[in-house]
Amino acid sequence: MIKKIIQKTGIHFFLILISILSLFPFIWLISTALKGPEENIFAYPPIFIPKDITFNNFIGVWKQIPFLLYFFNSFIVAFFTVMLNLIFSSLAAYPLARMEFQGKKLIFSMVLSTIMIPFQAVMLPVYLIVLKLHLVDSYGMVNGYLGLILPFAVNAFGIFLMRQAYLSIPKEMEEAAFIDGCSVFNIWRKILIPMTAPSLAVLAIFTFIGSWGEFLWPGIVLTNKTLYTLPVGVNDLQGMFSANWRYIAAGSIISIIPIIIFFICMQKYFVSGQNEGAVKG
């Protein structure tokens, strides 16, 4: 009994320590955003509690860059990226989970293999394709949005997650609906989609976080400041020879608030959705 208590205490202590270490950058970010210009933000050892807490950095960064415009751009890009991922991933996963056809396992293996390829490795050919299709902001606002959204409209992780969710649903339900005259598309839309809502929520959370925080691709594609997303807009605070790190920290905190709100709204589906997406033998 005592041995189990000691083991549980050790495990909890280890998990708390890991949590504190993972929160360290965020704590430093908040501390930097609340410090005045007279305090050294790079002091060693670091001072996390400011001597005089000030919110002037938040006010200053809000006045210095068009936050509402950047927020709107990020929202448009994230919203349509999430919606397209939910639609395309769930559609692509359906035949891989429920239909039998030649080369099914090979196709699924090829889809999974793309997870191992980082986006940086294919960024150049993707950029050339986007450029040839005129999906850059120099050809108009809509083209600029499409250039940010379409390269991330579907991903292998989403297909894998939805396939595993479909496999957890008994086939008898589909067979009963098919006998009643329901088409394949209606079976997918009216039966499978409602039953895999938790997995869709998990996919939405991961996609939203990835799209909202994406910096590299918008930083390369966008040239028009009116289409900047929040990460690119906040980075614009950094000049060529100097950077106001207090403003950057304040802007970063403001930019992650929507992610926290979105996660809180979807968290009740998160655990159940992860269980549905677990690997099924």
Image: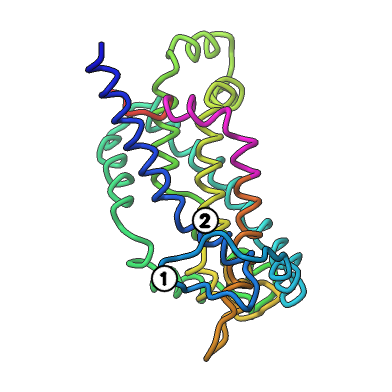
Confirm whether the magenta stretch covers residue 246. no
* Quadrant location, the C terminus: top left
Local crowd at mark 1 within 10 Å, few (<14), some, or many (≥20)? few
**Residue 27, numbered label:** 2
Local crowd at mark 2 within 10 Å, few (<14), some, or many (≥20)? some
The answer to whether the residues at label 2 and label 1 have Cβ atoms under 8 Å apart is no
Q: Distance from label 2 to label 1 (Cα)?
A: 15 Å
Residue 68 located left or right of residue 103: right
Q: Residue furthest bottom?
A: 241
Name the amino acid type tagged 2. Answer: Ile
**Residue 79, numbered label:** none
Give the tally of numbered discs.
2
- Disc 1 on helix, strand or loop? loop
Task: Give the labeled residue for mark 1.
Answer: 44
Residue 144 located left or right of residue 111: right
Q: Residue furthest left?
A: 3
Confirm whether the magenta stretch covers residue 265. yes
**Can you give x and y, in whole percent of width and height, for residue 167 in the image?**
39, 23
Name the amino acid type tagged 1. Answer: Tyr
Question: What's the magenta region?
Answer: 261-275
Residue 230 visible? The answer is: no
Where 96 falls versus 280 (above or below)? below
**Viewer-proximal residue, 137 or 217?**
217
The mark lying in front, picked from 2 and 1, is 1
Give the residue at x 55% y 41%: 204
Q: Main secondary structure of the magenta part?
A: helix
Give the residue at x 26% y 24%: 7
Residue 211 located left or right of residue 160: right
Residue 278 visible? The answer is: yes
**Can you give x and y, in whole percent of width and height, for residue 215 in the image?**
51, 67
